[in-house]
Structure formats: C-alpha cells, structure tokens
C-alpha cells in the first residue's frame, strides 16, 4: 500500500546526543516536509524539500538538519544544538505538479531524558 | 509571513450539538485552504477549499471558504464522541514548496 512511514514511533534522547528520525514514502511525491508539534499546538515547519538533493529551511530550522539523497527518503536529524527537542515530529509529502492535500506519516514522539 | 489563526482554542460540547470552528488566514498568493482532523497521531485530511462560497460536505461535516473575508469555517452537526479531536486548518499560497501554513488548531471534546 502507498503511504508514508516514519520510524521510530517513540525515541528517547539524552542531552547532547544527535538523533535521526526516518521518513520514507512510496507515493512518488516530489515534495516532502518535516513539522514539529508541541502539546496542544499546531504544526510548525522545520524543513522542506521539493526535489532530490535540494531542501530549504522552514520557520524553525535551527538545531535541525536534513538530507534528500533519494526521492523516497527525507530523514531529519535533531542535533544537540536544538535546546528543546521534546516534541511530536510529523513528516508529510505532497505532489508538486498539482498540489493536493499533504499526506502525513504517523509521527515520532521524541523525548529528551 | 503567512499566518493562519484558528478559534476557539478549545471547545467542549455534548453529543448531538452542532459546532462551528473558525479559521482566518493571511496567505500570500493564496491557492487553497485545507482542514485536517488529528485524533492521536497523523492528521487525516477532511477538505480542500479553493473557491469562495462553494460548500464542501462529507456526512455531518461541511466547510466553506470566504476569499473576500479571508475566512473559512468547519461545521459539524449532530456531534458524536468520535468527533473529539484537534481540528487543524492550513493555508497554501503559490509558493515554490507548496508549503502549508498551519493554525494552532481547535481542540474539540464531545461528551456523551
């Protein structure tokens, strides 16, 4: 079945560690996005990518990094520079030729311990 | 900078009530407005609105867009406990990344 898969579902990080969240899609979408959601709040854009080997910063990119080496994959690294990383992270994808709704993965809940 | 504002922040109703959720937007070169329902994890798509004044309907849910007033509403009639969720509104402009700018969401709780 086509869709977006995020892993892991839950992730615990010690302070000072980098962690990488996985996002894979088989929808053949060009555009992929990473959002952060804090409790009781909406989604804020971290990074997005329209095409392989290209990505752009969103509204809250500081402390995060991404790569887009394959169309299907858009991993997000939460670095030690991100001072408040505990949040729910959602990956999404969307076709670019005729933009429709964005399709979301099931999310990764990251907790700093 | 694009901006989407939702109101109310939260709402508690009883089963059978009708609710109206509000979404105002300021989106450069506006293209579409989307509504999502988020229960636990991934937001699920409800509606995409591009034309003013045309109601989109799915069962007990309906939505309409007013491009002149930069506003959209989501109506839910005869609410059920299963409607309890966060409802997210997002605007898309004619931007290079087809990015969605999300509002803060409305948390709806439907009591039996």
Image (cartoon, rainbow, N blue to C red):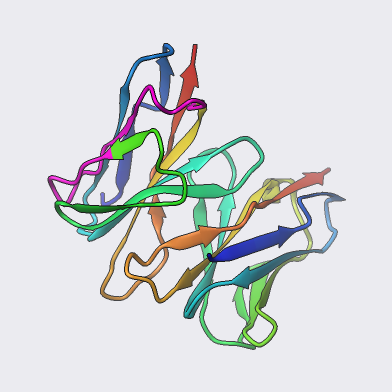
Q: Is residue A21 left or right of residue A102?
A: left
Magenta segment's dominant SS is loop
Which residue sits at x=26%, y=74%? Answer: A97
Q: Is residue A31 left or right of residue B66?
A: left
Report the magenta residues as a range. A66-85
Q: Is residue B89 left or right of residue B44?
A: right
Using the rendered view, name the quadrant where residue B49 is placed.
bottom right
Which residue sits at x=60%, y=87%? Answer: B52
Using the rendered view, name the quadrant where residue A7 is placed.
top left
Which residue sits at x=43%, y=13%? Answer: A15
Q: Position of residue A6 (x, y in %)?
A: 33, 36
Which residue sits at x=49%, y=11%? Answer: A113
Q: Position of residue B44 (x, y in %)?
A: 50, 53
Q: How many marks?
A: 0
Which of B104/A79 is in front?
A79
Which of A36/B51 is in front?
A36
Q: Is residue B49 left or right of residue A26?
A: right
In the rendered image of this protein, does residue A62 appear above or below residue A15? below
In the rendered image of this protein, does residue A98 appear above or below residue A62? below
In the rendered image of this protein, does residue A89 appear above or below residue A49? above
Which of B10/A16 is in front?
A16
Q: Position of residue B16 (x, y in %)?
A: 84, 57
Q: Position of residue B88 (x, y in %)?
A: 60, 56
């Amino acid at each position: 079945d086509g869709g977006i898969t995020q892993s892991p579902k839950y992730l615990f990080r010690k302070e000072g560690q980098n962690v990488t969240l996985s996002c894979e899609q088989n929808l053949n979408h060009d555009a992929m996005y990473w959002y952060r959601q804090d409790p009781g709040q909406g989604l804020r854009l971290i990074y997005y990518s329209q095409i392989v080997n290209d990505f752009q910063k969103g509204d809250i990119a500081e402390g995060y990094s991404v790569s887009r080496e394959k169309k299907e994959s858009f991993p997000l690294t939460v670095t030690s520079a991100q001072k408040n990383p505990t949040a729910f992270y959602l990956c999404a994808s969307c076709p670019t030729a005729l933009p429709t709704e964005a399709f979301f993965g099931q999310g990764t809940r990251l907790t700093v311990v | 900078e694009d901006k989407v504002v939702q109101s109310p922040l939260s709402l508690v109703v009883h089963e059978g009530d009708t609710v109206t959720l509000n979404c105002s937007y300021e989106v450069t070169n506006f293209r579409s407005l989307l509504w999502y329902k988020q229960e636990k994890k991934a937001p699920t798509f409800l509606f995409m609105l591009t034309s003013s004044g045309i109601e989109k309907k799915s069962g007990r849910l309906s939505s309409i867009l007013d491009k002149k007033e930069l506003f959209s509403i989501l109506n839910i009639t005869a609410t059920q406990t299963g409607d309890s969720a966060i409802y997210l509104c997002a605007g898309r402009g004619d931007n290079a990344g087809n990015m969605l700018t999300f509002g803060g969401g409305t948390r709806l709780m439907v009591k039996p």
